[in-house]
Image (cartoon, rainbow, N blue to C red):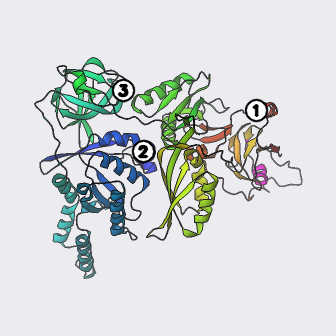
């Protein structure tokens, strides 16, 4: 169901997807929700629309932090989950162990007896099968292997049996275990908006499940707003859509139980109640849905660099504001603040990934812009205590690297909560750590664990401020010249820094071309070439021993930059640069407000 190119590249679900399946005379609505903690608010709203949940658990890793969060919300709403143990075909899979951990998680989260008696299915999304009895499927696999070993090939009967299995057990379990929606189609129309979309032709579109009654195109209804105070606005339905398969189909009428997309009310918002005009607004108004508050912010700035407009369209501040305003219409967790800066606006979201996805989407649309380092959003409690966002961090790492990980996270104000072994021979570490302590940690974590570590986190709430964090251990290699990077200069610089550029890459003054091996920034001239005389060969440096530069992605650049640096994002390139490009102006500013380590320069 992840049909967006960005979702397929990252391997995550960014926005909830809805599909319908017609099976054995039944119409089954299935909604795929995001799994990452930055999109948890959409999960909460979707849970209010469904009758049950399919809890997907990895047969090797067991429940992960995001699994805990989704399950907790589902249990609180009284839903009875169906557990699907996925990747049961993997060599190191331990379906029984994963199921035991899942049961323990149910108990820990306070599930009642009915919820603890959950149905279990085993499957492989890659191979496209789900079965109730995994041992029976393994016997079929063994029979097939024996038949192939005898040289007879796959028997037609067994081929037909395996082909018929498919997802039949999944749909049969849903029909048997999930109660049908309790609806009254004869009553007057009532629904609550849980998701938003936008169309340039019809405006804002609301999505939700029809709780009772019927609705046709052209019918009048009342929009009841309950976020601050009950307010009523009259509206008329102009378009109705339902999902059939993976595609939206426009219809003339919908009835109770349908999940519908609706256009008509101009400024429909999350949590609004849509009702027939005959109903009393005070009596039928539904409680407002919770909209998650942002925890991380950054500035979106106009690209004022020398290369502006060469890769994409040089966006003005007005164009950036218009694009963000369109996003804010449907992305309810996003906040856009105009602080009066002539070069940019402040954008806040649920996390670093939430904002990085938005930047990547704008980049693919052809925008050029600069973004600042992510900063956490703090608040004060009733007693005046400073609070900051906190996260639960789960790390799976080989035993020989756990000491390094614990030491680094303790320096980032993390607290170790639990340690346990895993069937794969790894050690699972659980921490509580400030959100700001995780900014810039992922790249260092992969280096410390030689790429063998796995980390996942989720936002858990606000906690007391844990003190100042140390700054970045290494400084920047800052260009003080414009031109093309030369092999001669880069060969000398790579002895004292990790490079971000290759020979012949264009650079400009203030652009960061590498990471210094020591604290503090180092000025350099990456365009310097060897002065050749009549006794030197012009081909002498062709085989210079240059190491491959470190590739910069949007995520790694956002994690790496310091407070006085920006990420320059274009459709073709990601660069890092100083906020103030001029070397002389930066020196003057440092003299007026000295802070941090002194800069050094080299030719």
Would you call the spot at circle 1 few (<14 residues within 10 Å), some (14-19), or many (20 or more)? some
Crowd rating for badge 3 (residues with CA inside 10 Å; few <14, some 14–19, many 20+): some
**Viewer can see residue 366:** no
Up-down relation of residue 369 to residue 126 (above or below): above
Query: Mark 3 falls on what kind of element?
Result: loop
Percent x, y for residue 526? 76, 45
Q: Which residue is mark 3?
A: 227
| Residue 485 drawn in magenta | yes
- Side (left or right) of 138 relative to 27: right
Q: CA distance from mark 1 to mark 3?
A: 49 Å
**The residue tagged with tag 2: helix, strand or loop?**
helix
Counting from the top left corner in percent of width and height, residue 3 is at 36, 45
Name the residue beneath numbered marker 2. Answer: 5
| Discs 2/3, front | 3
Q: Tell me, yes or no, whether the highlighted magenta stretch contains residue 151.
A: no
Determine contact: label 2, label 3, CB under 8 Å: no
Work out whether mark 2 precedes mark 3 in sequence or the reverse, and give the earlier one.
Answer: 2
Front-most of 46 and 574? 46
Q: Nearer the viewer, mark 1 or mark 3?
A: 3
Residue 169 numbered tag: none
Image coordinates for residue 6, horizontal then vertical, percent: 44, 44
Image spot of residue 410 (x, y percent) = 62, 55
Along the line of sight, the residue nearer the viewer: 97 or 109? 109
Which mark is in front, 1 or 2? 1
Identify residue for label 1: 582
Q: Which portion, as a residue range, is magenta?
A: 484-495
Q: Quadrant of the C terminus?
A: top right
How many callouts does the rendering have? 3
Rendering quarter of residue 599: top right
Q: Which SS class for mark 1?
A: loop
């Amino acid at each position: 169901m992840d049909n967006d190119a960005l979702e397929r590249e990252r391997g995550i679900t960014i926005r909830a997807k809805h599909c319908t399946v017609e099976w054995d005379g039944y119409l089954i609505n299935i909604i795929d929700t995001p799994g990452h903690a930055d999109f948890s608010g959409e999960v909460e709203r979707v849970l209010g629309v469904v009758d049950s949940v399919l809890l997907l658990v990895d047969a090797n890793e067991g429940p992960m932090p995001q699994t805990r969060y989704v399950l907790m919300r589902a249990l609180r709403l009284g839903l009875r989950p169906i557990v699907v143990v996925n990747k049961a075909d993997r060599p190191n899979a331990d379906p029984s162990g994963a199921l035991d951990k899942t049961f323990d998680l149910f108990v820990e989260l306070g599930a009642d007896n009915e919820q603890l008696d959950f149905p279990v299915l085993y499957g492989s999304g890659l191979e496209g099968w789900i079965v109730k009895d995994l041992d029976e499927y393994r016997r079929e696999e063994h029979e097939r292997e024996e038949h192939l070993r005898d040289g007879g090939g796959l028997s037609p009967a067994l081929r037909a049996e395996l082909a018929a299995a498919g997802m039949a057990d999944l749909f049969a379990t849903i029909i048997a275990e999930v109660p049908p929606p309790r609806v009254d189609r004869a009553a007057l129309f009532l629904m609550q908006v849980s998701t938003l979309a936008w169309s340039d032709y019809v405006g804002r579109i609301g999505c939700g499940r029809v709780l009772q009654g019927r609705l046709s195109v052209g019918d009048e209804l009342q929009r009841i707003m309950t976020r601050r105070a009950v307010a009523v606005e009259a509206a008329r339905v102009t378009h109705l859509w339902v999902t059939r398969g993976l595609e939206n189909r426009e219809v003339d009428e919908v009835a109770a139980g349908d999940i519908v997309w609706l256009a008509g009310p101009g400024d429909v918002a999350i949590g609004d109640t849509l009702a027939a005009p005959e109903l009393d607004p005070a009596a039928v108004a539904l409680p407002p849905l919770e909209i998650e508050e942002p925890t991380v912010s950054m500035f979106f700035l106009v690209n004022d660099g020398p290369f502006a407009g060469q890769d994409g369209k040089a966006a003005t501040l007005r164009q950036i504001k218009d694009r963000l305003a369109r996003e804010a219409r449907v992305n309810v967790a996003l906040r856009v603040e105009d602080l009066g800066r002539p070069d940019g606006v402040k954008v806040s979201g649920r996390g670093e990934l939430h904002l990085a996805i938005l930047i990547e989407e704008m980049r693919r649309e052809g925008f050029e812009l600069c973004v600042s380092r992510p900063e956490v959003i703090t608040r004060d409690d009733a007693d005046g205590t400073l609070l900051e966002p906190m996260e639960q961090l789960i790390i799976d790492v080989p035993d020989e690297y756990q000491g390094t990980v614990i030491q680094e996270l303790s320096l980032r104000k993390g607290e170790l909560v639990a340690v346990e072994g895993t069937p794969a021979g790894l050690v699972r570490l659980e921490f509580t750590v400030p959100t700001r302590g995780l900014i810039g940690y992922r790249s260092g974590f992969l280096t410390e664990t030689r790429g063998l570590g796995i980390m996942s986190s989720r936002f858990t709430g606000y906690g007391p401020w844990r003190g100042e964090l140390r700054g970045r251990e290494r400084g920047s290699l800052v260009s003080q010249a414009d031109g093309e990077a030369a092999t001669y200069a880069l060969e000398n610089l790579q002895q004292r820094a990790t490079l971000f550029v290759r020979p012949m890459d264009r650079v400009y003054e203030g652009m960061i071309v590498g990471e210094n091996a020591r604290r503090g920034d180092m000025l350099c001239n990456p365009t310097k070439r060897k002065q050749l005389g009549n006794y030197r060969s012009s081909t002498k440096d062709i085989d210079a021993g240059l190491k491959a530069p470190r590739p910069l992605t949007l995520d790694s650049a956002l994690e790496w930059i310091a407070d006085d640096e920006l990420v320059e994002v274009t459709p073709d390139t990601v660069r890092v640069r100083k906020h103030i490009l001029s070397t002389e102006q930066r020196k003057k500013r440092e003299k007026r407000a000295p802070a941090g380590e002194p800069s050094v320069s080299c030719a």
